[in-house]
Amino acid sequence: MFFISDTHFYHKNVIKYSNRPFDSVDQMNACLIDNWNSKVGKTDDVYFLGDFSFGTKEETQNIINNLNGKKHMILGNHDKPLKGSSGLESVRSYHRLKVQDSRTERGIQDIVLFHYPILSWEKRHYGAWHLFGHCHGSLTVEGLGKCHDAGVDNNNYSPLSYDEVYDIMKDKNFVQFDHHIDRRK
């Protein structure tokens, strides 16, 4: 299982806006595809957290066809080209994922997936993680709890595996934001 966001395929200006180390859109697209396919197998689930492509419907479909994995899309603010695309397992605006994981206290890890960062997300007070995109690595989340920017600009232009996310989250502290008590004690 993998998580990724904000590839912005075919978006020339994102190279400048996000200071990406590419000389052209073609070079960026090729690198992002190579990085994705070097980690993701044909049958792996990939949760994409928005802002996939700025290309035409045909260009966007070509990218989808060339990426490994079963693709689950969480829509971002730049995802109009995804409408009607084939090769997608699901298309949603928001998703709460439950992952079986014996390393967790309850044996299940809840993960809230949304394009935008949320300060107080569903099941947060039970240890749920929140993965988001949109910010291109510019938002400091230290001290905000078990959340992480899954965007490529923040993660070496590659998808993150569930185990990589687990390693990121295990060292983050639970942070109380609302009226719920810490029921994990």
Image: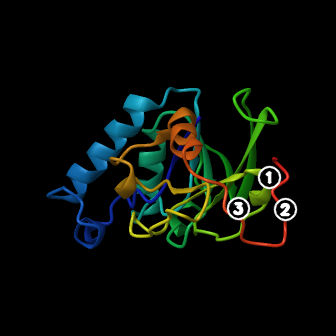
Name above or below for residue 85 compared with residue 171: below
Label 3, label 2: how far apart the Cα atoms are:
25 Å
- Residue 89 position within the rendered picture, expressed as x and y whole percent measured from the top left: 67, 43
Dot 1 alpha-carbon crowd within 10 angstroms: few under 14, some 14 to 19, many 20 or more: some
| Residue sitting nearer the eye, 155 or 103 | 103
Q: Earlier in the sequence, mark 2 or mark 1?
A: 1
| Secondary structure of the residue carrying numbered label 3 | strand
- Which residue corresponds to the image point at 72% horizontal and 30% vertical from the top-left? 101
- Which residue corresponds to the image point at 61% horizontal and 59% vertical from the top-left? 145
- Which residue corresponds to the image point at 44% horizontal and 60% vertical from the top-left? 6
Q: Which amino acid does label 1 sit on?
A: Tyr
Residue position marked by numbered label 2 in the rendering: 181
| Residue sitting nearer the eye, 146 or 47 | 146
Q: Which of marks 3 and 2 is nearer the N terminus?
A: 3
Q: What residue type is labelled 3?
A: Tyr
Q: What residue type is labelled 2?
A: Ile
| Residue sitting nearer the eye, 23 or 39 | 39
| Residue sitting nearer the eye, 98 or 47 | 98
- Residue 93 position within the rendered picture, expressed as x and y whole percent measured from the top left: 68, 64
Image quarter for residue 9?
bottom left
How many circles with numbers are drawn on the protein?
3
Is 138 left or right of 14, judged from the image as shown?
A: right
| Secondary structure of the residue carrying numbered label 2 | loop
Label 2, label 1: how far apart the Cα atoms are:
9 Å
Is 77 left or right of 136, judged from the image as shown?
A: right
Q: Earlier in the sequence, mark 1 or mark 3?
A: 3
In the image, which is nearer the foreground, mark 2 or mark 1?
A: 2
Residue position marked by numbered label 3 in the rendering: 94
Is 95 left or right of 16, judged from the image as shown?
A: right
Residue position marked by numbered label 1 in the rendering: 126
- Residue 63 position within the rendered picture, expressed as x and y whole percent measured from the top left: 42, 47
